[in-house]
């Protein structure tokens, strides 16, 4: 690792002066011909991924996240737009000539080679001297904790082990970026959670840019420095995990990441970064809004279930509050989940931390107040 | 061979039930009956399969005095020393082996390429190709032989060694293509993408990754092609002209009596086949 680490140590100093993004996508579009019709899988994605970043592309299946990653790897040619690696245009460069490596969803290990041969494959192609191959493969197998299993065939290993072989096979080449296509999808929950932490550790250890494609919001939130939430071929929001969760930019993001409650209403008394939203049933709540909100315009307000307090008495002044009837109470161990029907017909989900002895605040059929701090709610343009 | 095995399953589960107190003794007797029946039946099938081969091998050691080698007249090794007594027979065997080898090489290359194309890509004319291949596999040899003969005659091609080989390639290429295609269809395409991703050119990807993965299919296709070619009679008869192969020579000799040398050569070909089959079984078990 001495050589490669020396390279890594020099890199941050240089990038402080001129931060060239590791990966840049510029107006990338991918169109397919399907049954005589043109289908746009990716409808124009522009983003830049910094050196050493753990970057996730999150979205439902068919949102274009895998196609976008395959365009970075070179397996798909963009219909329009530019792909740059370290500032160099690689749009027309073949995948075997690109300095990025990929971890496939199916692992795609070579079944006729043992672990050692699998990991050494990339270095062999680059004609790295045999002595150095030995050293680097050995070190990489140590990092992924597979020392002593060099002679095993992929078939003889568990899913988690195969996963780590795939990781080692890609990382040993010391690529500019590592692309991971739903790499934990085939593992069971326990192993998946362990591997999430493992991946983050390895990423810190080797300092390589990770681009991670997943449909699992927990994975993305756990590991990422930044997340691009994608839907229908477009990036809906690009931000850090906290901001994505706390301040979703669109209705789609609010709905896709975690549970969200939505209220629709009309904006009144707009000004000073806030507005009063009047709901259909006459309830009024104060909400922080952006510049785009206009007096009398339709606005949707979202608030996370764990930010809401449920109570039988009318809450104190200074909080936003609505009334409703409890339609379902579910005991979930660490918290209780309430389904509450608001007067206007909207259904709200409320989580209540199970911190007290007599934890059930309300029963099915009870009339309750739901309240929250105004800054925990936010308006999103509809 | 699944026939003799399937009756064993109910028999065995009845045996397990026989341990329960409710099961009476008559039931237990029927179980042993079934087992015995299965045992006998299995050996009957094996004897029936191997008896002709055993007879062929044995009569290579028959100390026959007459022209016809059908009555056992004592053990001898002398025919093994006089293997080359019939130059035309030796020549026919050499023809059969070289034709089979050449046809196998050509068939394997063509069939493998066809199998990859059919398994990997979607192209215009694919359905027709599949249909033609199926037709080649299922059409009677007599029909194919007769039509090949009329084709060669109408083209003015002199039938002989080359036309036999071409005919053998023609009827066995579909078998190789089908075997390889099955293997290609089962491949995970991302494995080849992984090779490309790790810096391998398309050429290296094929030889280092794709080919080793489809090799079991290619090997069994090649063995099939060799086996089909070496003992083919019907199509060879139509396309041989003046050339004589091993099966054709035996057919011609039947009327005047088949010499023990034929049995010995048959034994040798069979032995080689057994060795190849055994080796293939063990190596493919190690590969997968």
Image (cartoon, helix red, strand yellow):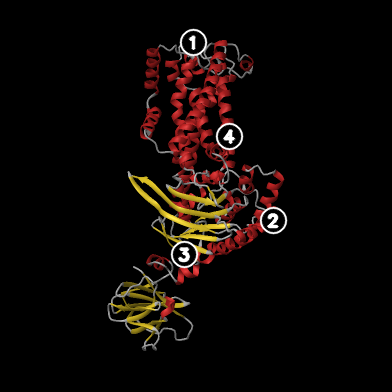
Looking at the picture, tell me which residue is in the foreground, B48 or B194.
B194
Task: Write down the chain letter for disc 1.
Answer: B
Looking at the picture, tell me which residue is in the foreground, B81 or B113.
B113
**Residue under the point 60% across and 57% down:** A208
At numbered mark 3, what does the secondary structure look like: helix, strand or loop? helix
Question: Disc 1 to disc 4, how far (Cα)?
Answer: 37 Å
Task: Write down the chain letter for disc 2.
Answer: A
Q: Which residue is mark 3?
A: A217
**Residue under the point 52% across and 51% down:** A84
Judge if badges 2 and 3 mark residues of a common chain. Answer: yes
With respect to residue A38, does B51 lie above or below?
above
At numbered mark 2, what does the secondary structure look like: helix, strand or loop? helix
Q: Are marks 1 and 4 in contact (CB under 8 Å)?
A: no
Q: Earlier in the sequence, mark 1 or mark 4?
A: 1
Dot 1 alpha-carbon crowd within 10 angstroms: few under 14, some 14 to 19, many 20 or more: few
**Which numbered tag is attached to residue B278?**
4
Looking at the picture, tell me which residue is in the foreground, A246 or B165.
A246
Question: Disc 3 to disc 1, how far (Cα)?
Answer: 84 Å
Dot 3 alpha-carbon crowd within 10 angstroms: few under 14, some 14 to 19, many 20 or more: many
Judge if badges 1 and 4 mark residues of a common chain. Answer: yes
Residue A204, horizontal then vertical, whole percent? 61, 62
Question: Disc 2 to disc 3, how far (Cα)?
Answer: 35 Å
At numbered mark 4, what does the secondary structure look like: helix, strand or loop? helix
Would residue A117 be visible to someone looking at this image? no
Q: Which residue is mark 1?
A: B256
At numbered mark 1, what does the secondary structure look like: helix, strand or loop? loop
Q: Which residue is mark 2?
A: A6
Task: Write down the chain letter for disc 4.
Answer: B
């Amino acid at each position: 690792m001495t050589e490669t680490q020396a390279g890594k140590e020099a890199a941050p100093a240089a990038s402080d002066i001129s931060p060239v993004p590791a990966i840049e996508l510029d107006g990338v579009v991918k169109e397919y011909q399907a049954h005589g019709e043109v289908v746009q899988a990716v409808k124009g994605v522009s983003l830049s991924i910094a050196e050493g970043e753990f970057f996730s592309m999150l979205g439902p299946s068919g949102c274009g996240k895998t196609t976008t990653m395959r365009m970075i790897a070179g397996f798909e040619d963009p219909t329009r737009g530019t792909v740059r690696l370290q500032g160099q245009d690689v749009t027309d460069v073949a995948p075997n000539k690109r300095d990025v490596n990929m971890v496939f969803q199916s692992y795609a290990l070579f079944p006729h080679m043992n672990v050692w041969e699998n990991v050494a494959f990339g270095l062999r192609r680059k004609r790295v001297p045999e002595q150095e191959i030995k050293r680097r493969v050995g070190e990489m197998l140590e990092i992924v904790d597979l020392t002593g299993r060099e002679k095993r065939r992929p078939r003889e290993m568990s899913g988690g082990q195969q996963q780590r072989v795939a990781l080692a096979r890609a990382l040993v080449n010391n690529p500019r970026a590592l692309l991971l296509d739903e790499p934990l999808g085939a593992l069971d929950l326990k192993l998946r959670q362990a591997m999430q932490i493992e991946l983050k550790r390895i990423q810190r250890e080797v300092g390589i840019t990770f681009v991670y494609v997943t449909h699992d919001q927990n994975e993305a939130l756990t590991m990422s420095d930044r997340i691009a939430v994608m839907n229908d071929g477009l990036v809906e929001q690009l931000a850090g995990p906290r901001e994505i969760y706390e301040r979703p930019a669109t209705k789609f993001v609010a709905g896709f990441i975690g549970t969200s409650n939505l209220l629709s209403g009309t904006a009144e008394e707009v000004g000073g970064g806030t507005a009063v939203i009047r709901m259909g049933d006459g309830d009024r709540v104060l909400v922080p809004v952006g510049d785009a909100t206009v007096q009398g315009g339709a606005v949707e307000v979202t608030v996370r279930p764990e930010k809401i307090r449920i109570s039988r008495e009318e809450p104190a002044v200074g909080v936003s509050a609505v009334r409703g009837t409890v339609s379902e109470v579910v005991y979930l161990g660490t918290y209780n989940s309430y389904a509450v029907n608001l007067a206007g017909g909207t259904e709200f989900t409320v989580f209540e931390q199970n911190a007290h002895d007599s934890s059930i605040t309300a029963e099915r059929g009870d009339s309750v107040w739901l309240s929250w701090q105004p800054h925990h709610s936010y308006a999103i343009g509809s | 061979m699944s026939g003799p095995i399937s009756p064993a399953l109910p028999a065995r589960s009845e045996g397990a039930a026989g341990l329960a107190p409710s099961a009476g003794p008559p039931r237990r007797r029927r179980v042993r009956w079934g087992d015995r029946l299965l045992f006998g039946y299995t050996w009957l099938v094996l004897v029936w399969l191997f008896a002709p081969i055993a007879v062929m091998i044995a009569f290579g050691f028959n100390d026959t005095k007459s022209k016809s080698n059908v009555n056992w007249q004592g053990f001898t090794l002398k025919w093994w020393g006089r293997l080359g007594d019939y130059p035309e027979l030796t020549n026919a065997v050499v023809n059969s082996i070289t034709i089979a080898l050449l046809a196998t090489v050509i068939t394997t290359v063509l069939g493998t390429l066809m199998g990859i194309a059919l398994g990997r890509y979607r192209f215009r004319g694919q359905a027709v190709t599949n249909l033609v291949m199926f037709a080649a596999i299922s059409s009677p040899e007599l029909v194919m032989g007769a039509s090949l003969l009329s084709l060669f005659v109408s083209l003015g091609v002199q039938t002989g060694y080359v036309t036999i080989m071409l005919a053998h390639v023609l009827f066995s290429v579909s078998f190789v293509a089908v075997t390889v295609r099955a293997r290609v269809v089962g491949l995970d395409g991302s494995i080849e993408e992984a090779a490309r991703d790790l810096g391998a050119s398309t050429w290296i990807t094929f030889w280092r990754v794709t080919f080793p993965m489809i090799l079991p299919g290619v090997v069994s296709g090649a063995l099939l092609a060799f086996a089909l070619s070496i003992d083919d009679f019907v199509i060879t008869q139509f396309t041989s002209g003046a050339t004589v192969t091993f099966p054709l020579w035996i057919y011609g000799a039947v009327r005047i009596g088949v010499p023990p040398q034929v049995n010995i050569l048959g034994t040798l070909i069979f032995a080689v086949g057994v060795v190849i089959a055994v080796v293939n079984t063990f190596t493919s078990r190690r590969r997968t």
